[in-house]
């Protein structure tokens, strides 16, 4: 199974909304992890409309790490269900409850990242909302376990200008990883005004996914607004379904290729 890390630059391009949308439309069991280092409680206060998290989340995992009790076995217990479906399990791991807690997490990222990959053995994919890139990029441990890294941006000049400052940091960080980690753009609102082609040409990074600009359904995910009529059939939800499917197929192909190479390399 896979770990997908989503991030972006400043200006709120839609990282959280897209991460949540993909999670809700993912074609299998999945956990969305809020790893935004600028904690905002965006999902509990937005989509979950102030749901009591019962103290669950990264703070508990940090305490377990300090007590050397291991994060892995406790990870799923620190999540809550995002939907009530019977067929697919969609969980949410709440993020930092206090801004100061982020600093204390520096040496915990590797154990959390390892716990994410271990979830794969239970057939659960992980989507990480890594929030906006800092001046130092993202925690390397998260990138090291990522099967796909998506940089979310919009097609307007403000978002492109911010991306021009921050995307190179991520590209450099990914190049320095010991193993190849695929990086692609997730374009929110293509053609408003710049086209996908213009944007990929400017940045030299492939565009994996195009999410249409669809503010009312987006408000359901980002702000917990009442779903408008036709929400489930909206262009936004449709695009998340297609994107989730394409992404899982891309990851499956990459896995098959790795397997083939390993087999071919065996004596
Ligand atoms: N496809 C979309 N169509 C229209 N509006 C969108 C879309 N995706 C996100 N938005 C809107 O953009 C705003 C910012 O979204 P979101 O909070 O997901 O951004 P973010 O990148 O996570 O921001 P931050 O860096 O502050 O965490 C929200 O109001 C959300 O409703
Ligand atoms: Mg966010």
Image (spheres, grey):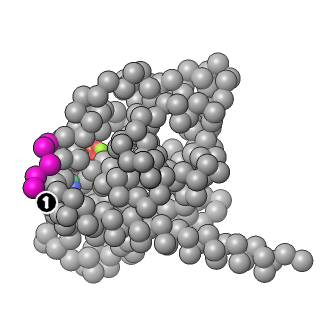
* Quarter of the image that includes the N terminus: bottom right
* Residue 240, position as x, y percentages in the image: 31, 63
**102 or 81, which is in the foreground?**
81
Q: Is the magenta stretch mostly helix, strand or loop?
A: loop
* Quarter of the image that includes the C terminus: bottom right
Residue 53 visible: yes
For the point 27% across and 36% down, the residue is 48
* Residue 186, position as x, y percentages in the image: 33, 64
* Residue 209, position as x, y percentages in the image: 34, 69
For the point 55% across and 34% down, the residue is 75
Q: Is residue 196 above or below residue 167?
A: below
Ligand 1 is within 8 Å of the C-beta of the residue at disc 1? no
**Image side of residue 133 versus residue 257, left or right:** left
**157 or 226, which is in the foreground?**
226
Q: What stretch is highlighted in magenta?
A: 225-229
On the image, numbered disc 1 is attached to which residue? 230
């Amino acid at each position: 199974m896979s770990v997908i890390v989503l991030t972006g630059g400043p200006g709120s391009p839609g990282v959280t909304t897209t991460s949540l949308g993909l999670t809700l439309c993912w074609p299998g069991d999945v956990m969305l992890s809020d790893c935004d280092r600028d904690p905002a409680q965006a999902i509990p206060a937005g989509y979950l409309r102030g749901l009591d998290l019962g103290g669950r989340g990264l703070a508990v995992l940090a305490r377990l790490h300090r007590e050397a009790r291991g994060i892995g076995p406790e990870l799923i217990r620190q999540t809550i269900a995002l939907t009530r479906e019977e067929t697919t399990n969609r969980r949410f791991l709440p993020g930092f409850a206090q801004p100061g807690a982020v600093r204390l997490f520096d040496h915990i990222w590797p154990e959390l990242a390892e716990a994410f990959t271990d979830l794969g053995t239970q057939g659960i994919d992980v989507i990480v909302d890594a929030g906006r890139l800092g001046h130092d990029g993202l925690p390397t441990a998260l990138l090291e376990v990522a099967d796909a890294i998506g940089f979310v941006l919009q097609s307007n000049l403000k978002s492109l200008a911010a991306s021009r400052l921050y995307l190179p940091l991520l590209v450099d960080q990914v190049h320095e990883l010991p193993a190849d980690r695929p990086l692609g753009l997730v374009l929110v609102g293509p053609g408003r005004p710049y086209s996908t082609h213009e944007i990929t040409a400017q940045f030299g990074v492939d565009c994996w996914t195009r999410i249409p600009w669809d503010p009312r359904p987006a408000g359901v995910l980002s702000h917990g607004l009442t779903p408008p009529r036709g929400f489930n059939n909206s262009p936004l939800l449709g695009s998340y379904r297609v994107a989730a499917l394409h992404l899982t197929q891309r990851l499956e192909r990459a896995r098959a290729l790795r397997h083939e190479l390993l087999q071919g390399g065996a004596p």
